[in-house]
Amino acid sequence: MPESLPSLMLTEASWLRAPAHLRWLDHQGLRLLDFSKASRLTTGFGPLDHDGRQPPDAQPDTTLTARMTHVYAIAGLRGLPGCLPLAEHGVYALLNTLQDARNGGWFGGLTDGKPSGEQARKQNYLHAFIALAASSAVVAAVPAADQLLERAANVWAARFWSESEGVFRESFDADWSDEEDYRGANSNMHSVEACMALADVTGDAVWRRRALRVVERFIHTYARASEYKLHEHYDRSWTCLADYNRDEPTHPLRPYGMTPGHFLEWSHLLLQLEAALLRTEGSAPSWLLEDSIGLFDSGISAGWARNGTPGVLYTVDENLVPVVENRPHWCQAETLIAAAALLKRTGHPRYETWYRTLWNYIDLHMIDRRRGGWIQEVDADNQPSAVIYPDKSDLYHAWQSTLAPLVPLAPSFASAVRELG
């Protein structure tokens, strides 16, 4: 399903034009989808071990459920058997047991049928993925998806959006009290993705404007002023928390320091937002492209092969000194998507080189041809590791890296697949 009108600036030799490469992408996407089908639980979805099996004590995780719903909805939209029923399963779980019927919003998961204290807390990161999942499910015509989308959008806008700041608030207690004294780049980055999808599906441009405001603060104001070093952690008065989680350098969502993979993930989100604005409004700020290139260059410089061994590492400190040199799979996937986006946007051969370099690296070090799926993490010597991610729970990042090269920068994935057929 290649993009119907690929960039005219791409050469005939580009991998993005090569039929064999496009077939390879489809094949890899199918392998990932098949591997993760085993993550279905009675309620929602849960993590898989390295062999693709559910642990005996597997519990439903709401973020995984939302991500699986999003992915399988789009895969079902492409006509791939077995996928739409899984999306339907996800929508049902999100509308029922995983939802907080008393206070509204969603639990982070369940432990033996009930949310723990931490799972009961309402997280923006999670709610952004529920909004994304609902929007993709609506495009795929999954039953009850419109109901999920309405609930998710209403809760997300009313509880998490801060109009005065132009960002999303981070978290609350179960009853929406006790707002966390924290503003995070990670959850707001994923909010940008979800906002663009909601704008496409609902037709309400306010979501796209919210995405632009988030980008203006985190990237065009803060990162640009720091030579595109992206600080992750702030308090509610917007003081940078440089020492945040210093004692948890391998935290899976809020690690100490800066995450070069996020520099690169923001890079392609900026290009997608630029394309969305050009497509719907006819104009977009010129700095979106400038900042995207700046983030890409900074992310590659800070993250790629810092010890001479290929791969994008996990974190660096304030001075860009490596902190955790393990290479998570998602950092490679997002770098690849950024290279593909910049290649489509500019046609510059350096991005073709990076696109090929990233796929060669992923093919040799991440794709697990013995047990299935992708290895979630390798160490500094590119040997399998489980320091940050102990299992193979993620489908979202890896699968989107197989889809992104096939579709245009806008609209968002589900809407693009529907348009391209």
Image (tube, rainbow, N blue to C red):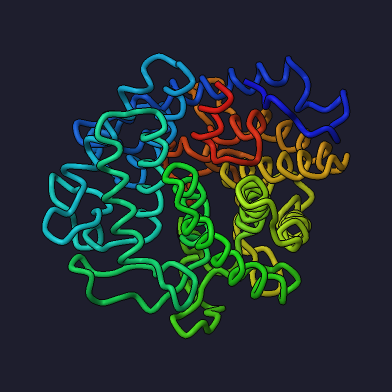
Judge from the rendering whether residue 347 lies leftward or rightward of residue 53; answer left or right: right
Q: What residue is rendered at 41% in x and 72% in y?
A: 162
The number of discs equals 0
**In the rendering, at what x and y percent does residue 58 appear?**
25, 38
**In the rendering, at what x and y percent does residue 268 appear?**
66, 49
Splitting the image into 4 quarters, where does residue 89 fall?
top left
Q: Quadrant of the C terminus?
A: top right
Q: What residue is rendered at 26% in x and 29% in y?
A: 143
Front-lying residue, 357 or 278: 278
Judge from the rendering whether residue 266 lies leftward or rightward of residue 286; answer left or right: left
Residue 16, placed above or below residue 300: above
Q: What residue is rendered at 33% in x and 29% in y?
A: 87
Q: Quadrant of the N terminus?
A: top right
Judge from the rendering whether residue 104 lies leftward or rightward of residue 129; answer left or right: left
Splitting the image into 4 quarters, where does residue 315 fall?
bottom right
Front-lying residue, 28 or 112: 28
Front-lying residue, 11 or 230: 11
**In the rendering, at what x and y percent does residue 401 appear?**
60, 35
**In the rendering, at what x and y percent does residue 295 appear?**
72, 59
Q: What residue is rendered at 76% in x and 61% in y?
A: 286
Q: Residue furthest front?
A: 282
Splitting the image into 4 quarters, where does residue 96 fall?
top left
